[in-house]
């Protein structure tokens, strides 16, 4: 019976991953013609995606949530200081991070890391569902932030192999909220807009 349940679980994860991969957007980041800008193009966005640009100290330089079918934007970086930056596009099923160097007003994209991920957070209506298989049974921290970045709720789970929680935003004030989950070095984010 245990083997049967394990096999069913593996099949469910496999089908969820395959279904998520079928709707993954095509992501293309390149330098602009003048050398001080980046151009991001995405198509087939069928789920909410987040764009983040951070510096080497993990300070957010740019953050944006995308829900459109296709997306194209030019990012002008001429006012940024020389240094290393990370440009991340993340959806519940895929994460792409570009490592960028800015030196003497010249941008170079020198590394691209792409990974598929099983959705840990998902939105359905006014609720955010959180499910995580915590294999190492380590500490998992969850925070809910409002649009100003203020922490509204936090939960800590210790020693649980299966961690789950539902966040109900049905009666929440109008705002853009962010649910952040930290599992060791992994961080998962899900935004929800209440209007």
Image (spheres, rainbow, N blue to C red):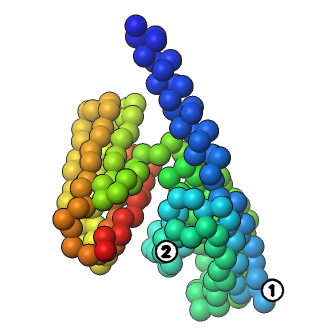
Q: Residue at x 56, y 70 (%)?
A: 68
- Across and down, in percent, residue 79 comes to 59, 92
Query: Can residue 182 be seen in this snapshot?
Result: no
167 left or right of 7 in image? left
Sort mark 1 into few (<14), some (14-19) or many (20+) by Cα contacts within 10 Å.
Answer: few
**Residue at which label 1 appears:** 33
Are the residues tagged 1 and 2 within 8 Å (C-beta)? Answer: no
Q: Which one is in front, 165 or 137?
A: 165
On-image quarter of the N terminus: top left
91 left or right of 188 in image? right
Q: Which one is in front, 42 or 75?
A: 42
- Across and down, in percent, residue 168 comes to 24, 56
On-image quarter of the C terminus: bottom left
Q: Residue at x 21, y 73 (%)?
A: 173
**Residue at which label 2 appears:** 64
Q: Which one is in front, 179 or 66?
A: 66
Instruction: Count how many numbered circles sit on residues in the image.
Output: 2
Circle nearer the viewer, 1 or 2: 2
- Marks 1 and 2, Cα distance to the nearest angstrom? 23 Å
Q: Residue at x 57, y 59 (%)?
A: 46
Query: Can residue 3 be seen in this snapshot?
Result: yes
Relative to residue 104, is residue 133 depicted above or below?
above
148 left or right of 187 in image? left
Relative to residue 129, is residue 90 depicted above or below?
below
Farthest residue toward the right?
Answer: 33
Q: Residue at x 58, y 87 (%)?
A: 80
């Amino acid at each position: 019976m245990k083997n049967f349940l394990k096999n069913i679980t593996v099949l469910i994860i496999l089908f969820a991953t395959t279904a998520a991969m079928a709707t993954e957007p095509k992501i293309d980041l390149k330098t602009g013609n003048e050398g001080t800008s980046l151009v991001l193009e995405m198509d087939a966005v069928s789920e909410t995606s987040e764009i983040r640009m951070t510096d080497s100290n993990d300070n957010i330089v740019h953050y944006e949530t995308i829900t459109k079918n296709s997306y194209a934007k030019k990012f002008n970086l001429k006012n940024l200081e020389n240094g290393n930056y990370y440009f991340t596009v993340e959806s519940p099923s895929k994460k792409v991070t570009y490592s960028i160097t800015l030196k003497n007003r010249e941008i170079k994209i020198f590394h691209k890391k792409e990974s598929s991920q099983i959705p840990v957070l998902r939105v359905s209506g006014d609720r955010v569902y959180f499910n995580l298989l915590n294999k190492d049974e380590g500490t998992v921290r969850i925070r809910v932030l409002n649009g100003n970045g203020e922490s509204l709720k936090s939960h800590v789970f210790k020693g649980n192999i299966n961690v789950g929680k539902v966040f109900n935003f049905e009666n929440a004030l109008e705002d853009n909220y962010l649910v952040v989950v930290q599992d060791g070095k992994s961080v998962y984010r899900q935004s929800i807009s209440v209007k």
